[in-house]
Image (cartoon, grey):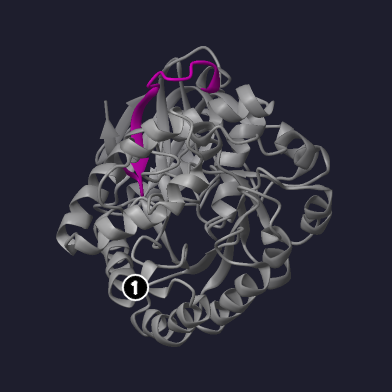
């Protein structure tokens, strides 16, 4: 669609929200047809238009093209124009795995790890997830909303336009429901797209020590019916790991979640090869996440499964874990998504720009692969690929404009720099530096 055609169509619609971004140095992740995700060799190419324009109306992408096809506008009424000379425009990052709602930080454990304590040793003395659970139980709903909103504002300013948020620091009926209500409040009061995940099976709370079967019954028989009644969660997740939940327990919980309207996700192969990927594939999980210890059997099982393997560079970096075999998975023809795992204990950052840099520097992903992983593939990993993750006519207008930079590859290259100038959510400017 030419820009003039777009304007003539929309000019007669009074009071429509219209936005034009012109003179874009590079418009990236452009697609002319719907796609679910990119896999294997197709991840190597990021589709772009140089010297481009992008038109937005009523929260949707209404048109795009090259400036050489631009015929000009005679009537600028009710049209806001942004000049992006020397700047890039990309779809907002989609962060498909976070624990963004929590009470208090855990820098003490950070110092303990530096002194030589392992993640498992810290957890065994009541740290880790149980530490966060104790703090969350004491926090009010309003306090949790306020602190989570601060984090949400931060990641929006860094270019994130869609985010999944998990429960799992409550570990009781009352506190898990409290967390999920906080996520619902954030959904209702923010332009950023939010998906909610029930992660009651994050750990076994102290009051159920030695009675894990009883705790699983609480998750399935008490919490899930109430979550479904109140429509509090889109997904159900399980931490499948030694000393947490076994593959059989994972499948039991996920199958129950499906019956209560929640699609499966799995924390898989983070600390060991524990069977989480195979359990997730068998249950039809939308994603399996972490994957530091994934092996050949898991890679084979993921082929054509529809389950999105998702790596979380922040957690592996912060905990000094082995790198997930990202290169091997892509070369085997798999898709790969990228998320932050924003949480207080193992990845206290939701900066997706940094995650992309780590993926390139440590996992040997190309900039194009990393950006594809953090946009369309991570949108798929939270069921948003039809509306988010690419720039295409009719999709939600969630995009960001960079500062003046020489190339797309400069984004992961300049790790630690803040290159996001403007963030647009649902067609409206949500952040401007």
Q: Nearer the viewer, residue 78 or 238?
A: 238
Which residue appears at 52% of the width and 12% of the height? 406
Q: Is residue 421 left or right of residue 292?
A: left
Residue 235 in the image: x percent, y percent? 50, 68
Q: Nearer the viewer, residue 199 or 209?
A: 209
Q: Is residue 218 left or right of residue 245?
A: left
Residue 377 in the image: x percent, y percent? 61, 47
Circle 1 sits in a helix, a strand or a loop, which is it? loop
**Quadrant holding the N terminus:** top right
Residue 58 in the image: x percent, y percent? 35, 52
Residue 432 appears in the figure: yes
Q: Is residue 204 left or right of residue 76?
A: right
Above or below — where is 41 with respect to 191?
above
Above or below — where is 318 with respect to 382?
above
Report the span colored magenta: 412-428
Q: Which residue is mark 1?
A: 172
Above or below — where is 149 with respect to 199?
above
Q: Residue furthest top?
A: 406
In magenta segment, residue 134: no
Which residue appears at 56% of the width and 48% of the height? 378
**Quadrant holding the C terminus:** top left
Q: Is residue 108 left or right of residue 61?
A: left
């Amino acid at each position: 669609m030419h820009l003039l055609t777009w304007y003539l169509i929309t000019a007669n619609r009074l009071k429509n929200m219209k936005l034009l971004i012109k003179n874009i140095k590079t418009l990236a992740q452009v697609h002319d047809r719907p796609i679910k995700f990119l896999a294997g060799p197709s991840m190597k190419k990021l589709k772009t238009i140089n010297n481009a324009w992008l038109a937005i109306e009523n929260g949707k992408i209404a048109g795009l093209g090259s400036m050489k096809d631009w015929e000009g506008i005679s009537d600028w009424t009710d049209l806001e124009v942004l000049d992006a000379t020397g700047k890039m425009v990309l779809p907002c990052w989609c962060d498909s795995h976070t624990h963004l709602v929590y009470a208090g930080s855990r820098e003490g454990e950070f110092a303990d790890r530096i002194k030589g304590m392992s993640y498992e040793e810290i957890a065994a003395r009541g740290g880790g997830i149980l530490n966060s659970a104790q703090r969350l139980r004491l926090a009010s709903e309003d306090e949790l909303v306020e602190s989570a909103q601060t984090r949400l504002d931060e990641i929006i300013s860094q270019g994130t336009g869609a985010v999944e948020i998990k429960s799992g620091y409550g570990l009781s009926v009352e506190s898990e429901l409290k967390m999920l209500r906080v996520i619902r409040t954030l959904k209702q009061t923010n332009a950023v797209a939010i998906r909610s995940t029930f992660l009651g099976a994050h750990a076994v709370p102290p009051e159920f020590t030695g009675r894990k079967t009883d705790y699983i019954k609480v998750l399935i028989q008490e919490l899930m019916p109430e979550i479904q009644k109140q429509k509090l969660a889109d997904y159900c997740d399980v931490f499948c790991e030694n000393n947490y939940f076994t593959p059989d327990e994972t499948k039991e919980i996920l199958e129950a979640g499906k019956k209560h309207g929640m699609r499966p996700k799995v924390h898989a192969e983070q600390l060991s090869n524990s069977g989480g990927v195979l359990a997730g594939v068998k249950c039809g999980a939308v994603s399996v996440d972490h994957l530091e210890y994934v092996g050949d059997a898991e890679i084979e099982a993921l082929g054509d499964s529809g389950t999105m393997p998702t790596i979380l560079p922040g957690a592996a970096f912060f905990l000094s874990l082995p790198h997930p075999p990202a290169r091997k998975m892509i070369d085997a023809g798999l898709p790969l998504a990228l998320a932050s795992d924003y949480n207080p204990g193992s990845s206290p950052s939701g900066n997706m720009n940094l995650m992309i840099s780590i993926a390139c520097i440590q996992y040997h992903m190309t900039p194009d692969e990393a950006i594809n992983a953090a946009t369309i593939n991570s949108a798929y990993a939270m069921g948003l690929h039809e509306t988010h993750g690419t720039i295409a006519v009719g999709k939600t207008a969630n995009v960001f404009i960079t500062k003046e930079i020489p190339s797309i590859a400069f984004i992961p290259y300049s790790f630690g720099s803040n290159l996001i100038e403007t963030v647009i959510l649902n067609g409206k400017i949500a952040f401007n530096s």
